Amino acid sequence: MDRFLAIYMNDQLALGIGWRQLAKRSQRSNRGTEVGNALAEVATGIAEDVETFRDMMRRLGFRENPVKVLGALASERLGRLKLNGRIVRYSPLSRFDELDFLTMGIEGKKQLWHTLESLADLTTRLPEVDFQHLIDRAEHQRTLLEPHRLQAGKAAFRTQ
């Protein structure tokens, strides 16, 4: 069981690192705007979640898989090369894609916390971890980004 849990947690760590990098990049691209401020808060929260997750893995005795971490970092960088309707500049589609991907990641993170709490029964092994707080924080992040995601989608698909 621990072998499968360690694999699962390494997969989730890699995803979290990818989302963290995307949030930071998106925040930089939107600096000085309302969406940039929301992204700054979300990026900070995601970074804290990644560190919380790493701490959980250490306490469970699971080693990080450096190949998966490097793969996540490389994938996030390769994702920057996708066509966004403009050759050099940030486009309305870029903003929407980033916000859409981030909200998908946040929903996945909520599911992760539920899985670790309920299915993996980590509340017994890690009683000091407040899974409900982590779930609530993910919900807050999702709520914070949603109006900006909707606005970015409208702007992207009305502007051609």
Image: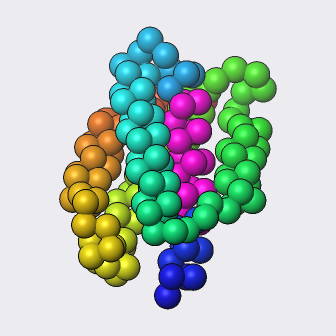
Q: Residue furthest top?
A: 32
Going 41% across and 15% down the picture, which residue do you hit? 33
Describe residue 157's horizontal placement relative to residue 103 as left or right.
Answer: right
Picture layout, residue 12 above or below residue 155: below
Describe residue 135's horizontal placement relative to residue 56 as left or right.
Answer: left
- Residue 46 appears anywhere in the view: no
Picture layout, residue 120 above or below residue 92: below
**Snapshot quadrant of residue 63:** bottom right
Picture layout, residue 118 above or below residue 129: below
Figure coloring: rainbow
**158 or 57: which is nearer to us?**
57
Q: Which residues are magenta?
A: 11-26
**137 or 3: which is nearer to us?**
3
- The question of residue 58 being in magenta is answered with no
**159 or 19: which is nearer to us?**
19
Q: How many marks?
A: 0
Magenta-drawn stretch, dominant element (helix, strand or loop): helix
- x%, y% of residue 93? 58, 35
- x%, y% of residue 12? 53, 62
- x%, y% of residue 160? 60, 29
- The question of residue 23 being in magenta is answered with yes
Going 67% across and 54% down the picture, which residue do you hit? 69
Q: Residue furthest bottom?
A: 1
Going 59% across and 30% down the picture, which residue do you hit? 25
- Residue 63 appears anywhere in the view: yes
- x%, y% of residue 77? 73, 40
